[in-house]
């Protein structure tokens, strides 16, 4: 009996061994298959086939540069132009004057810049050297989410991109829920202007809320619509133009007589500005030396200055929430947009929250 049991056990072991050896081993993907080329289209409509993830890029777009920091891939930026926050990298110049020789010498996988600047001379110089030019904006509201997803794919950071977009959508949903039921007759009329031109030239350059094709316009202008307001201006933006403002004369502004003015720029305030002193100086100069003092907005003290990055650019969802609170304080009395700003800097960029980004004379 004992001998019989031993024979049975040996037989079963033999069967198991044969069965296991007959199974095909799991095939490991060859390295070249793991890095299959990917075909995609950029925001300008150009099609590319590139190996991914991108390992080394030159970025001539401050919004994309910050998005790459959010994704945690800033180490893959070999050089930048017209950008802040990458002071330890080579500077290839502003969008109006790019150092092409410097870019070619770096041999990047790609150059990422805006859709409307620099012009196509960039492609003519770089593509013969085997350097593709990818054009994204990452500041226009209808494009930002898809562009962030694309960046996540190109830099192998899809999960991080989706986590960020989920956090961003939560803020946007909170805004939408509170402004969606504002009656048309109660919507406030807002004119969005360049604070720099108004302060230095005493003139009016408007950020339109709509393009000539009927699409959402410049971020600073379209922020009015997103915040539940109405555009007091009827000028349109040609999105093929490099300038994002439209010049109007003083009479036009006085005739429109907006009840709210929002003033925007990148030179006033920002991360390193720790007080509102300069805001006050600019505000007082505008009131003393322009016709703004003749507008309803001045009479009601409804003049607000916002740093472009917080309302017309990559952090617009936070700035628009602040604008909505400025327009309709009762509806947003329990919301503190600055809390979201702090989260953005500390949780997504991994740096301390700092700076002065918004101003109102009502805060005196």
Image (spheres, helix red, strand yellow):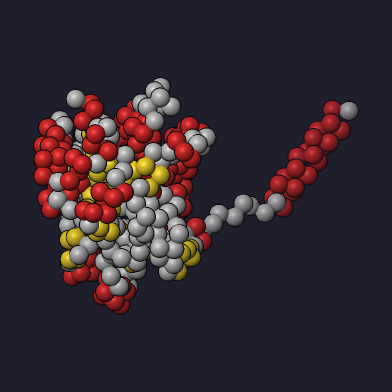
User: Residue shown at 31%/39% (left/top)?
Assistant: 259
Is 173 located above or below residue 22 in the figure? above
In-front residue for pair 45/109: 45
Count of numbered labels shown in the rendering: 0
The picture places residue 3, in percent across and down from the top left corner, at 84, 32
Which corner quadrant of the image does residue 347 belong to? Answer: top left
The picture places residue 143, in percent across and down from the top left corner, at 43, 54
Is residue 220 in view from this perspective?
A: no
List the single residue furthest toward the right.
Answer: 1
Quadrant holding the N terminus: top right
List the single residue furthest toward the top.
Answer: 334
User: Residue shown at 36%/59% (left/top)?
Assistant: 236
Is 119 located above or below residue 277 in the figure? below
Q: Is residue 170 left or right of residue 223?
A: right
Quadrant holding the C terminus: top left
In-front residue for pair 237/342: 237
In-front residue for pair 52/59: 59
The picture places residue 124, in percent across and down from the top left corner, at 29, 76
The picture places residue 311, in percent across and down from the top left corner, at 32, 43
Is residue 235 in view from this perspective?
A: yes
Which corner quadrant of the image does residue 129 belong to? Answer: bottom left
Is 143 located above or below residue 351 in the figure? below
Q: Is residue 49 left or right of residue 310?
A: right
User: Residue shown at 46%/38% (left/top)?
Assistant: 185
């Amino acid at each position: 009996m004992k001998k019989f049991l031993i024979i049975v056990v040996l037989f079963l072991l033999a069967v198991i061994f044969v069965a296991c050896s007959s199974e095909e081993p799991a095939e490991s993907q060859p390295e070249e298959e793991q890095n299959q080329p990917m075909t995609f289209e950029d925001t300008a409509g150009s099609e590319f086939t590139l190996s991914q993830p991108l390992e080394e890029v030159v970025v001539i777009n401050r919004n994309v540069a910050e998005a790459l920091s959010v994704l945690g891939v800033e180490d893959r930026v070999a050089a930048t132009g017209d950008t802040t926050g990458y002071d330890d990298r080579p500077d290839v110049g502003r969008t109006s004057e790019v150092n092409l020789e410097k870019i070619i010498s770096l041999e990047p996988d790609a150059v990422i810049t805006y859709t409307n600047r620099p012009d196509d001379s960039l492609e003519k110089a770089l593509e013969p050297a085997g350097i593709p030019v990818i054009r994204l904006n990452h500041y226009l509201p209808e494009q930002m989410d898809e562009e962030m997803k694309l960046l996540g794919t190109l830099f192998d950071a899809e999960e991080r991109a989706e986590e960020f977009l989920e956090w961003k959508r939560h803020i946007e949903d909170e805004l939408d829920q509170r402004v969606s039921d504002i009656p048309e007759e109660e919507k406030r009329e807002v004119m969005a202007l360049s604070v720099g031109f108004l302060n230095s030239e005493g003139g009016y350059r408007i950020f339109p809320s709509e393009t000539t094709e009927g699409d959402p316009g410049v971020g600073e202008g379209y922020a009015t619509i997103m915040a539940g307001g109405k555009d007091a201006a009827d000028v349109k933006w040609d999105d093929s133009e490099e300038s994002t403002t439209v010049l109007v004369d003083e009479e036009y502004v006085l005739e429109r007589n907006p009840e709210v003015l929002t003033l925007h720029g990148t030179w006033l305030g920002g991360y390193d500005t720790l007080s509102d002193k300069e805001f006050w100086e600019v505000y007082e100069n505008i009131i003393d030396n322009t016709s703004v003092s003749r507008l309803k907005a001045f009479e009601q003290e409804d003049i607000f200055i916002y740093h472009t990055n917080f309302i017309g650019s990559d952090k617009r969802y936070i700035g628009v929430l602040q604008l909505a609170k400025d327009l309709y304080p009762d509806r947003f009395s329990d919301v503190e947009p600055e809390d979201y700003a702090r989260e953005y800097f500390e949780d997504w960029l991994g740096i301390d929250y700092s700076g002065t980004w918004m101003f109102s004379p009502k805060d005196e």
